[in-house]
Amino acid sequence: MKLLNAAGHEFDAELFVVPRDGTEGFAIIFQSRGGKKGSPSARNPDYFPALEELLRRFKEAQAVIATIYVDSERVRHLSIQERVLEMDFPLRVHDLENLNELRREICRKQQPVGRRPGTSGGNSTKQIRLEVEPCSDMPNPEAAKKCLRPLMAEEPEFVPRPTPTLPDEYSPKEGFRVKPSEPLEEEPGYVVVKKLSLVQRLLLWICQWLPPSRKR
């Protein structure tokens, strides 16, 4: 799945929501970034902003991250303890103000995992697994999926316009009438006048006040 930001924009970064092993809550497998940016081979180019958006969702839900460890194929021969990021777990995200700094720290702490002895540097956009404790909004994987990717804002409900009404109708029996609240219908004996000049309107108005003998 991919996350959406507050404006409905989809981040190009893939993640999976899965059950935790033998305990409550859920886990996020956040896939690595790779390939040259802007090229057809680019993979998950929105790694940084999507990870920060994920942390923001955790903050809103008052979720607690039990642990984070590197989960790439290249380091799976190592024990989980050797792959855990050197951070102060559990992370109570809702107590943290600077999520950008938290995201940077998570990325920095990935670099030494699986690094050869005596070397420096390292990849800061590896595939990671975030183990999350259950919370009221996200107690299990299914609830987490719904919470992390809400539906796009629904289109406004289409409400058909009412039948247009023409206020000007003329009846030989009743003269000039105005019925703004009634829909336009063809009635026997009625002539519907759709367009009248000012002079015609005035004449029709005069006609309705003339005695019947004067109208003939």
Image (tube, grey):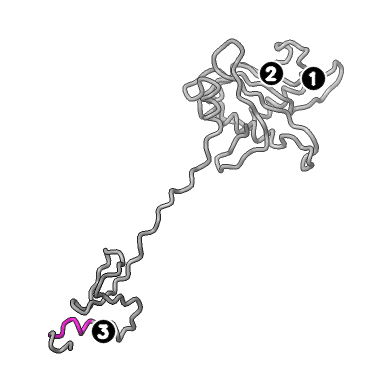
Name the disc covering residue 149, or none.
Answer: none
The residue tagged 1 is: 74
In this view, the mark in front (3 or 2): 3
Q: As shown in the figure, which amino acid type bears the numbered disc 2?
A: Tyr
The x, y position of residue 30, in whole percent, is 67, 26
Which residue position is annotated with label 3? Answer: 202
State how far apart marks 3 and 2 are (Cα). Answer: 86 Å
Q: Position of residue 180 (x, y in %)?
A: 27, 67
Q: Secondary structure at mark 3?
A: helix
Residue sitting at x 79%, y 35%: 35
Magenta segment's dominant SS is: helix
Lateral position of residue 208 relative to residue 128, left or right? left
Circles 2 and 1, Cβ within 8 Å, touching? The answer is no
Q: Is residue 127 left or right of residue 90?
A: right
| Circle 2: element type | strand
Residue range corresponding to the magenta coloring: 205-211
Whichever of labels 3 and 1 marks the residue nearer the N terminus, that label is 1
The percent coordinates of residue 18 (x first, y second) are: 61, 21
- Nearest to the eye among marks 3 and 1: give it: 3
Q: How many marks?
A: 3
